[in-house]
Image: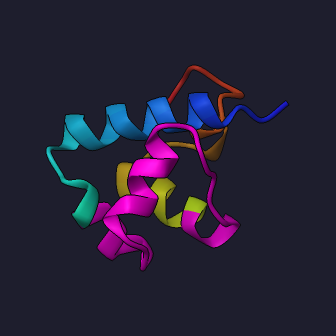
Amino acid sequence: MFEKKIFGQRLLLLRKKKGVTQTDIGTLLGITQTQVGDMERGNSATTMSRLYLLCDYFNVSADYLLGRSDTP
């Protein structure tokens, strides 16, 4: 089962590790900083096309971001 909390925690971790802001991620995805914050808090998810962009940007698998694997 998909857990938005795991997705959010991993997104936050990857973002901080890369040293970018929520605004930077928002610009990448075409959404607001507030929407990125909502994803990181586990209050919302994202679309498949945005998930693809995140995986490509952070060089991780979708399974990792979605909590299906612990291997980035």
Which quarter of the rendering shows the N terminus?
top right
Farthest residue to the bottom: give it: 30
> Residue at the location (37% across, 49% down)?
58
> Residue at the location (54% across, 24% down)?
71
- Name the chief secondary structure element in magenta: helix
Depicted 24 relative to depicted 68: above or below: below
Residue 64: quadrant of the picture? top right
Q: Is residue 2 visible?
A: yes
Query: Where residue 63 appears, x then y in whole percent?
Result: 67, 37
Q: Is residue 64 visible?
A: no
> Residue at the location (48% across, 50% down)?
38
Horizontal side of 68 relative to 22 (left or right) equals right
Residue 50: quadrant of the picture? bottom right
Whether the magenta-drawn stretch holds residue 29 is answered as: yes
Query: Where residue 43 appears, x then y in whole percent?
Result: 59, 44
Q: In this orientation, which residue lies closer to the viewer: 58 or 39?
A: 39
Query: Where residue 6 appears, x then y in whole percent?
Result: 58, 28
In magenta, the rendered stretch is 24-50
Whether the magenta-drawn stretch holds residue 31 is answered as: yes
